[in-house]
Amino acid sequence: MINMREVVETNKMIEEENLDVRTITLGISLMDCIDSDLEKLKSNIYNKITLTAKNLVSTGKEIESEFGIPIVNKRISITPIALIGGAACKSSQDFASIAKVLDDAAKEVGVNFIGGYSALVSKGMTKADELLIRSIPLALSTTDRVCSSINLGSTKTGINMDAVKLLGEIILETAEYTKEFDSLGCAKLVVFCNAPDDNPFMAGAFHGVTEADAVINVGVSGPGVVKTALEKVRGENFEILCETIKKTAFKVTRVGQLVAQEASKRMGIPFGIVDLSLAPTPAIGDSVADILCEMGLEYAGAPGTTAALALLNDQVKKGGVMASSYVGGLSGAFIPVSEDQGMINAVTAGAITIEKLEAMTCVCSVGLDMIAIPGNTKATTISGIIADEMAIGMINQKTTAVRLIPVIGKDVGEIVEFGGLLGYAPVMPVNQFSCDAFIQRGGRIPAPIHSFKN
Amino acid sequence: MKRTIITVVGKDTVGIIAKVCTYLANNRINILDISQTIVQDYFNMMMIVDMNDSLKSSAEISKEMAQIGEEIGVVIKCQREDIFDKMHRI
């Protein structure tokens, strides 16, 4: 039987160390909404989302109160809209009008984000893909809760450099469209290499075409819990360090598994995966960078950071895999800048650069995330940064992503406020040397040799 | 069996257990186990209860218990046993 020590330990994690379930994300297939008539399509989409997700928020709240575990976000992911809108949309404006419907549906069911204003163009773009991508600045500036993601490359297909070039321009344009709000639109836009079909975390969540009609995916988090556990093993060797992280990750993930199964049972929707991620928030004591510091670094970014992050990421996976029947999504440590107080401190102290962050993305779960850069950065430079990150993902057979925010009207050192979970960040310097001629080439980078495993 | 863990933490005062137990009895909630200690004047109690015949839903019980806690100056939490069981047992 459960004893008092165990109860106290769990409740301390929840109350003092920010243990929470970061998100219950309901994936909804919109394949059966497709119609060549735009108005019909929009009403199909609205009806399907509001019907399938009508109990999502109330179920989440029920579970929260019964188990005493906070569930921070309830969200929805949908089939990439480029696939759904292809038959009906003849212009970028047509696509943007679907974004408006998604926004309305999200508000109706009470979720804070809906992800899937997406296109999968890792090898080539269809006309619909291109129209959707070109509509992103308008779509993200006229909606509040819609998130957009584009898959630009994969280990199997190589990198679509035409799309990489286009996205550099689109990110800048989105920044321009939302310049009154510190270019906030770009915080809702992420580009991927090897994008997973079942990621519950925003801005990159979409409901892949390999998924069932509806599915519940859960993202757990608890950087504060890992940090506190490590405080007790200061000065111990790596074996003890790694064991401590692994055991803690196990406990955190078990909570996610429980919540996922309960939500699935209560809503009558199959359970998909648990995403075992360490996702920070700007709250004090909820930072991945602080874990790295606890391991013995003065700041995130100091020599040794990549090794520390590598072991953290690996131990989180090892502990988490045992705790859940199905794991997926991004699963690992996130290193966003603006959403992590320890990262912000590192930038302010001059301890970390974009180049170091890039190195860190080789061993963490995702990529260059929530990094504010000067608004006068060239589109080709952004494309160059994206191409580098996509190459890391392609060659290392891992998911990588880029979510950069060129803040219009701001320069290096100035502070950008995004508010809420998105946090704030100092604008970071970008390498000023040109990659124009490289990006202008066009075409695609072929898949690497180790992709041919047949 | 639908088991729930009730934790009561706060400054020790007369009648905490009485108040909590009366409420549970009135709502037909059976107490299976109680452990209680005082650490530096602080009252710590954990109860394992069976809610199968409860007259109210878990959410209602949890809300009302929290209110009772406020009245007597302690924090009362009701949580389904599963969350502890899943975290600490393989």
Image (spheres, coloured by chain):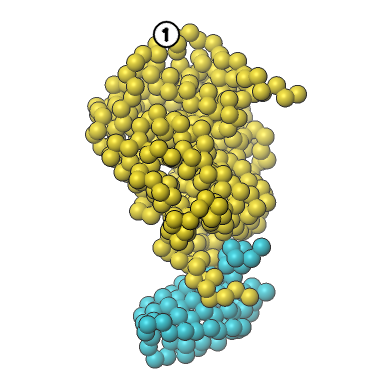
Q: Residues within 10 Å of mark 1 (few under 14, many from 20)?
A: few
Q: How many marks?
A: 1
Q: Quadrant of residue A330?
A: top right
Q: Residue at x 60, y 15 (%)?
A: A446
Chain given the colour cyan: B
The single residue placed furthest to the right in the displayed view is: A454
Residue at coordinates 49% horizontally, 48% vertically from top-left?
A: A278
Residue A112 percent location from the top left of the image: 44, 46
Q: Quadrant of residue A41?
A: top right
Vertical arrangement, residue B77 with respect to residue A79, above or below: below
Task: Please tell me whether residue A228 is drawn above or below residue A208 in the rendered image.
Answer: below
Which chain wears yellow?
A
For mark 1, what is the residue? A437
From the viewer's perspective, tell me whether residue A414 is left or right of residue B32. left
Which residue is drawn at the image coordinates 48% and 40% (left, top)?
A307
The vertical placement of A326 against A177, above or below, is below
Chain under disc 1: A
Can you give x and y, in whole percent of width and height, for residue A212 in the image?
Answer: 68, 40
The type of residue carrying mark 1 is: Ala
Q: In front here: A128 or A240?
A: A240
Q: Where residue B74 sits in the image (x, y, percent)?
A: 39, 79
Q: Quadrant of residue A314?
A: top right
- The answer to whether residue A113 is seen in the rendering is yes
**What residue lies at 51% left-to-right and 16% top-to-bottom?**
A161
- A320 displayed left or right of B74: right
Question: In the structure shown, which secondary structural element does the residue marked by tag 1 occupy?
Answer: helix
> Is there any visible trace of residue A59 in the rendered image?
no
**Quadrant that contains the C terminus of chain A:** top right
Task: Estimate the x, y position of residue A422 in percent, counting from the top left.
Answer: 37, 42
Q: Quadrant of the N terminus of chain A?
A: bottom right
Question: Observer-nearest residue: B89 or A43?
Answer: B89
